[in-house]
Amino acid sequence: MDDLTERFWNMAKLLDEASVLLDAQSKVVAANDAALDILGSHITGYPLDRFLRHPDFADAVRRASYEGALTSLDYTRMDQVRRSFTLRIAPFEPGYVLLVIFDGTMDLSVERIRSDFVANVSHELRSPLTALSGFIETLQDGAVEDEAARMNFLSIMQGEAARMQRLIDDLLHLSRVEAEEHRLPNAAVELVPILEELASAMRDMADKNDKTINVEIAPDLLSGNDDTPFAVQGVRDELRQVFQNLVENAIRYGAPDSAVNLRVGKGRLASGQTRDDLLRVQVINKGETIAPEHLARLTERFYRIDKGRSRQMGGTGLGLAIVKHIVNRHRGRLRIASAAEETTISVTLPRVS
């Protein structure tokens, strides 16, 4: 290690942020692990503008190298998850420039999530609050003396209050997931035990709805020699939440006397190409075919095909939105297909090598 890079590494140890040492032509001389996580592991030795697209970046490097100028740039990186950064470019040694990348994604996410939360709560709680107020006024006007009416109203009021509680719980859960969406999990999680646990835990719900739950493993996975053939990179509780939400929907909206099949196989790209480094879980159920115009909007928060039916079954309209953001955090892909009275929701995730 020469004196230049040694000084860079000594300085980088003092910073939590991503740091990159560049020459006057923007070529990467050295980069710490945080920078490699953001920009890619193969940037060293190449001009950084191949990997970091910003119209003013090259000029900022030139001004830092030749004029000693300090420049700050806002930078948005559009990968699977939108991330926001502030780039600070400053002179380091003659002919060399220091780039420090400050990740502002969390701050912007928290502000947006706070705004969305207030808007969603104020809109979605209006209906049950209006219903509660109406029943309370009716009871105060004399209906409280009618025992049958009183018990009926109280039962409805209890249901509306429970609906508000579910809505708030799901909104808080969604907010937490969105806030963490840009952070890639790094634990190895095996999928089949999660699916088998869910099949067992949700058997009573399935029985009450005249359904069965089956877990199937594709033969091409069983023929592998990997010690952990069904492991993906993720957070176990979040992945369990994904498949629990999908199975609950399949049970609620599937046809009576039908099966919910959880099928694990090799993953595919959007082009249809099968990949050994991907795993796919398909949740398949029989029921009404979902019209194409609804499929693309199912993961929007509060989007419901049949609002009355969804609320009657206890849905908040947030389940698939939560699923989408968890899958995004895991750098996976969510696909919904529906044809011939069969709906298939596929979750494709990167496999642990």
Image (tube, rainbow, N blue to C red):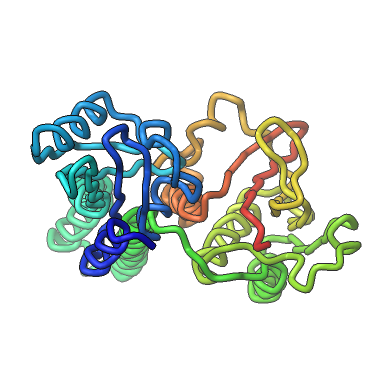
* Quarter in which the N terminus is drawn: bottom left
Which percent across, then down, holds residue 66?
Answer: 14, 32
Residue under the image location 13 percent in, 58 percent down: 141
The vertical placement of 275 against 252, above or below, is: above
Residue 175 in sight here:
yes
Taking the image as shown, residue 180 lies to the left or right of residue 281, namely: left
Taking the image as shown, residue 14 lies to the left or right of residue 177, namely: left
The vertical placement of 53 against 122, above or below, is: above
Quadrant for residue 230, please give it: bottom right
* Quarter in which the C terminus is drawn: bottom right
Q: Who is closer to the viewer here, 119 or 142?
A: 119
Residue under the image location 63 percent in, 33 percent down: 290
Q: How many marks?
A: 0
Which percent across, then down, holds residue 197?
Answer: 67, 75
Quadrant for residue 307, please give it: top left
Residue 148 in sight here:
no
The vertical placement of 216 against 270, above or below, is: below
- Farthest residue, direction front: 2
Residue under the image location 91 percent in, 62 percent down: 223
Taking the image as shown, residue 183 lies to the left or right of residue 297, namely: left
Which percent across, then down, holds residue 288?
Answer: 68, 37
Which percent across, then down, holds residue 144?
Answer: 21, 67
Residue under the image location 20 percent in, 44 percent down: 86
Taking the image as shown, residue 328 lies to the left or right of residue 131, namely: right
Q: Who is closer to the viewer here, 50 or 227?
A: 50
